[in-house]
Amino acid sequence: MNDSNAAVRELDAVVVGAGFSGMYMLHKLRGLGLKVRVIEAGENVGGTWYWNRYPGARCDVMSMEYCYSFDPQLEQEWEWTERYPSQPEILRYLDHVADRLDLRRDITFRTRVTSAHYDEGANRWTVTTDAGETFSARFCVMATGCLSTTRKPPFEGVDAFRGRTFHTGEWPHEPVDFTGRRVGVIGTGSSGIQVVPVVAQQAAKLHVFQRTPNFSIPAHNGPLDPDFVKQFKSRYPAHRAEARVSLFGVPWAIDMNSALGVPPEERQRKYEAAWAQGGATPMLVAYVDLLANEQANETAAEFVRQKIREIVKDPKTAELLTPRDHPLGTKRICVDTDYYATFNRPNVELVDVRSAPIVRFTATGLETAAAAYELDDVIFATGYDAMTGTLLRIDVRGRGGVSLRDKWADGPKTYLGLSVAGFPNLFTITGPGSPSVLSNVVVSIEQHVEWTADCIAWLRQEGYATIEATPEAEEKWVAHVNEVADTTLFPKANSWYTGANIPGKPRVFMPYVGGVGPYREICDGVAKKGYEGFRVGA
């Protein structure tokens, strides 16, 4: 329940968000004996998995790996049912963790943080909420998530539409029935690719409005084999250790050969095996140079394009679904169940809104530059203001009243993705400049939370009141993030990794491409050198 007491509540730490990050952060800080409050907009724990309830919502990391590793007993007792976990199952898991660790007593639900201002005189953060509460805390931890602020393009006339509208990232809690209805899905990123096959099975007619096709690889999802689970659990410690030093947070070995250095028939066999295995990672680690060499990448991209042509019966539709504007993997590869095959259904039509954009909504549907479409329901699968969107919706102000929004006017700047110069004792879990969205994010979350908790413990042990990144360390880290990105093909894509999906957002490559393992080494090295690149205050 929200407290109605208007007095300032004194705490050691405020954590914003109760998804994977905020829940683990609460657990770790409690373990240090700190008085902590988590503020969460939803009615329960779960973060992005609380909001993303759309039909077909599923993680693209395998369930046995998309879970906490900090508690061996929890690893052993929880039973996943499918290879790739569905949204309801992930939410059940996080509910279970919240119950097991008794987290909810320190979480304020149904409440949004509106501002977080640093008080230089007191060396404390003043955090206010939309419920009128004010908290004062030594530390402020932003566990706001990378994909938590939805984006809906400002289409003309959308308010005049008399049908139902939905956004995949803000789905109703009650089931939605599309039986016999004319449905439009706008967007073919990950959520669009997941929702389309499910809605197609119900709708009388489904129009899929696509501006940019994306590469998608089948999940080959299914029930988990009990023997596989038993074997996996028996080697969890070794598996987790490998994940922590891996490139993507999943311990897949990269073939160190060049895709261009093997015979075409051998390469074809390798790609066929990766496709049959399912998921994005087997394809990306098939050869060492797929994300660094355009010619090498083209061999894998063309393999996937050929698969699309084989699956989709209508050549024109197949061509429209075939990505040609970005190298494979430079946008997050989607993982699907029967996405391409869905376009063989007689009730499904692909609408190309690159050649004929959506012009306006009407009372009964929408119009493109080429045609009008009568619709009963519209699903916006239009994505998120990723990585920075949620942080910048909060009025965050550091030293001298400088706002984070002004500081990041030309793009986000952090040190290690964890700290921002001029904002003492503020920690950003999986912030811009960290591997986060290029990894199994739970592995990255655990690393960030543990590093942050260790840092706070060190400050208390050494008798320091504050810690903040130096401007020099921040500039050096931003340069390093860009330098590493420029050795890859990632900057060649107009992706949400660069903010390209948000009009007016500065184009900056936000994640760290150097890999989960190397990044962990850097962070550990910083801590071992007495938090090199940080300034501490008594």
Image: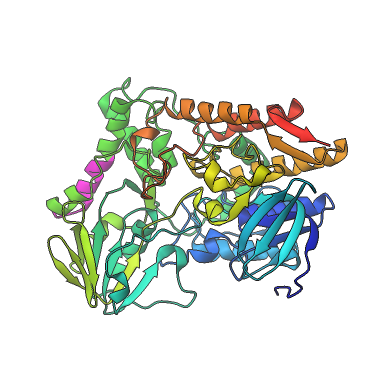
Q: Is residue 446 above or below residue 327?
A: below
Does the magenta-highlighted stretch encompass residue 307?
A: yes
Residue 445 in view (yes/no): yes
Image coordinates of residue 503 in percent, x first then y, are 36, 50
Q: Which residues are magenta?
A: 304-314
In the picture, measured across the screen, residue 32 lies left or right of residue 467, that is right
Identify the image quadrant of the C terminus.
top right
Render colour scheme: rainbow
The rendered magenta stretch, by its main secondary structure, is classed as: helix
Q: Nearer the viewer, residue 499 or 77?
A: 499
Identify the image quadrant of the N terminus.
bottom right
Q: Is residue 505 above or below residue 509?
A: below
Residue at 31% x, 27% y is 294
Residue at 59% x, 42% y is 444
Q: Residue furthest top?
A: 261
Residue at 34% x, 67% y is 379
Q: Quadrant of residue 258?
A: top left
Does the magenta-highlighted stretch encompass residue 204?
A: no
Total number of numbered discs in the rendering = 0
In the picture, measured across the screen, residue 463 lies left or right of residue 215, that is right
Residue 97 in view (yes/no): no
In the picture, measured across the screen, residue 213 lies left or right of residue 118, that is left
Image coordinates of residue 56 in percent, x first then y, are 41, 63
Image coordinates of residue 263 in percent, x first then y, are 28, 23
Q: Is residue 478 above or below residue 502?
A: above
Q: Residue furthest front?
A: 400
